[in-house]
Each structure stands twice: as C-alpha cells, then as structure tokens.
Amino acid sequence: MAFKYKFLCPAMVWGAMLFSVALSLAAPARSEPVQIVGFGDSLMAGFGLGPGEGFTEQLQEALRAKGHDVTVSNAGVSGDTTSGGLARLDWSVPDGTDLVILELGANDMLRGIDPAIVEKNLDEMIARLKARGMKVVLAGMLAAPNLGHAYGEAFGSLYPRLAQKHEVVLYPFFLDGVAAVQELLSEDGMHPSAGGIRTIVERILPTVEQAMAALPQD
C-alpha cells in the first residue's frame, strides 16, 4: 500500500498544478485597474468640500473597499452646463477610460434652458463616448418645482429617453436621498455636504457595479 502511495502522490500533485494553471488561464481577469471618470458640474467637482470628501474620492474608496481594482478621476467643473460639457468633453475624458459617469444638466435647469437643448447636448456626449469605446452611466436630474409642471416633465423625461436610446445604464436622480434633506446639504442648501456625498455614493454604488460588470475583460 505504501508503495502505491509513493507513486500516486506526485501524480496527484502534478495533476492539481496543471488544473490550477488551466483555471487561471480560463478565468477572465483585468491586467490594469478599471479607469472611471466622473464628468459633471459642481456636484461632481466637490464644490465646498475638503480633500477626500468629494464624490469621485468617496466612490473610489467605496469600490476599493468592495475589492474592485479601480481608479476614479474627477472631471467636474463647477458651473458647467451641458453646452460647456460638450465643448470640453474630448479633452477632459482621456483615452483609456473604461467608464464615464455623466452628470450634467442641473445648471441648465436652474437657468431655465430649453430641455430640448439639454437633450441634444447629452445625446451628442453619449454618442462620442460610446464611439471611443467607453461605457456610460447617465446620472439624471430633476427640475425644481418652481419651474412649473410642463418644464419639469420635459426635463425629467429626457434622461430615461436617452438611456433607452443609447442603451446605457441610468441612475435616475443623482441627488436621490439628499435633495431637500437639510442635514445632508451644505450651508447654501443646494450642494451636498460630505455626509450627503456619502449617501449619494451608497445609493449609486450598485448601479456603478452593474456598469462595471459589463466591461470587457483584457
């Protein structure tokens, strides 16, 4: 019995090694971190927040805590409209980006800009990003009640329509759970505090992970 064991043991070990190598070759794995860019306005830029408190920084921390190898870059510009975003899109989002979180439209809404113009600009941005091989998470926005029902309907409906047209992941309302919640807003009553950003990250995280799961493997 001992004689047979001496011959079987090395064979079993060698076979297990070959099986392990085969599994590692078959399993998809990325050789580099997933590159995510947050492209938007002051909500993305982190207006009034300190180091480590902004959306992209907190999102990166949350994703890494869940085991994702990821880098999240901030391409937010305070005060930006969809027209401004369209003008700077190509040079603000670098080649090699895997996923773009597109968050624009709040400033257009506050200025009462025609929703048709907002939709046209976002439509062009999504098309350009997709043409460069990038996945998109479209972060929606809702209109302030004082702009009236008709404007609110026209503005709020453009995000789902664009997401369906381009087959991109939609997060319906970027400020979900934060808008009008005073303790989660900064002193201006409009921009999220660090705690507000934490809430946004917690709520959007499954959507971002959904988009990441659809990324091609290297």
Image (cartoon, rainbow, N blue to C red):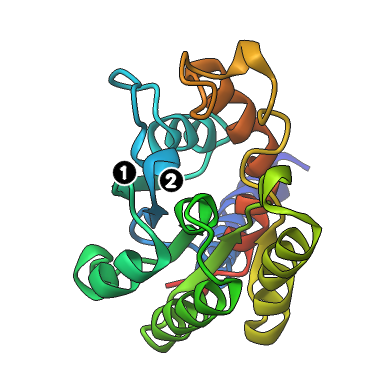
* SS category of the residue bearing label 1: loop
- Element under label 2? loop
**Pointer 1 local density, CA inside 10 Å: few below 14, some 14–19, many at least 20:** some
Amino acid type, residue under disc 1 in the picture: Ser
Return the residue found at the far left: 91
How far apart marks 2 and 1 lie (CA) works out to 28 Å
Whole-percent x and y of residue 34? 41, 56
Q: Is residue 3 visible?
A: no
Quadrant containing the N terminus is top right
Left or right? Give the position of 69 relative to 28: left
Percent of width and height locating residue 131: 41, 89
Q: Which residue is nearer to you in this view: 54 or 42?
A: 42
Instruction: Name above or below for residue 159 compared with residue 192.
Output: below
Query: Compared with residue 132, is residue 189 higher up or lower down, i.e. above or below?
Result: above
The residue depicted at 36 percent of the width and 70 percent of the height is 83
- Answer left or right for 185 relative to 71: right
Tell me, for residue 42, which label it has, or none: none
The image quadrant of residue 177 is top right
What x and y, as percent, mark residue 50?
A: 30, 18
**Residue at 52% of width from left, 72% of height from top?**
118
Along the viewing direction, whichever of 140 and 99 lies nearer the viewer: 140
Residue 157, quarter of picture: bottom right
Q: Which residue is mark 2?
A: 69
Instruction: Say which of 198 and 76 sits in front.
Output: 76
Picture coordinates of residue 109, whole percent (x, y): 55, 56
Q: Quadrant of the C terminus?
A: bottom left
Q: In percent of the image, x 24 and y 69: which residue is there?
A: 88
Q: Residue at x 41, y 78 (%)?
A: 129
Q: Nearer the viewer, residue 70 or 78?
A: 78
Q: Which residue is mark 1?
A: 78
- Kindly identify the amino acid type of the residue bearing the numbered disc 2: Asp
Q: Residues within 10 Å of mark 2 (few under 14, many from 20)?
A: some
